Image (spheres, helix red, strand yellow):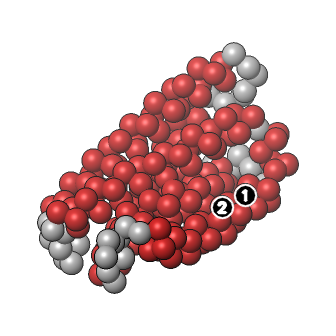
Amino acid sequence: MTYYTIDSIVRRGLPILLLTSLLGLTAGQLMNSQIENLVAIPTILLLIPALIKIGGDTGSMLGARLASAFHMGIGTTHIQKNPVVKNSVIAALIVGMSASVFLSIIAWIICCFGESGFSFSTIFTICIISSFFELIAVFSATIAIAFASHRFGIDPDDTVIPIIATLGDIVGIIAIFSTLHLMHII
């Protein structure tokens, strides 16, 4: 019997898709709860999609690397002693923070053509702080889900990327709103 049959793919994938659908609805409701504040600040509307994609995409990248390590047999159950985990997290953190810096520059350039009122340092601070919060949370969840999937005999490719991409949206929105509250913007 082949591992990849239509029935086995649907049985493994359907619960994950249902879970991610609920998480996606939650992310939308979080955004909806702050709609008045968001409409009043167009710069934040510009930043939100890109910032939440940074966390979801780099978390998915990390999850794919961990899943590949498990498939190759180089993953261990000792997270702290595993060089694959350490090096993958460092690389993903560098990519995520670099993307955040690049995003702040592009957003500032775009905002210069409009009437934003945000300085470059404000946009840069929003991007860096919210990205850092998001990346730490998403990477922790990625590692936990990847190791738990592998431990329970579930293919990490089937669980990590869909869950982390959606979880990145929720965590990203929370990180952005938290950063804006810390900076007394909303």
Q: Is residue 3 left or right of residue 141?
A: left
Q: Distance between the residues labelled 1 and 2?
A: 6 Å
Q: Is residue 138 left or right of residue 40?
A: left
As drawn, the residue found furthest toward the right would be 36
From the top left corner, tell me how far across and down residue 164 is, in percent: 48, 61
As drawn, the residue found furthest toward the top would be 113
Residue 160 in sight here: yes
From the top left corner, tell me how far across and down residue 48 is, in percent: 63, 44
Amino acid marked by disc 2: Gly
**Image point 23% across, 67% down: which residue?**
70
From the top left corner, tell me how far across and down residue 156 is, in percent: 36, 68
- Badge 1 element: helix
Residue 140 in sight here: no
Instruction: Residue under label 2, please give it.
Output: 24
| Camera-nearest residue between 165 and 2 | 2
Q: In this view, does 144 lie to the left or right of 167?
A: left
Q: How many marks?
A: 2
**Image point 76% across, 22% down: which residue?**
115
**Image point 66% across, 18% down: which residue?**
112
- Report the quarter where the N terminus lies: bottom left
- Is there a contact, CB below 8 Å, between mark 1 and mark 2? yes
Q: Residue 94 carries which label?
A: none
The vertical placement of 148 against 37, above or below, is below
Instruction: Residue under label 1, please give it.
Output: 28
Amino acid marked by disc 1: Gly
As drawn, the residue found furthest toward the bottom would be 152
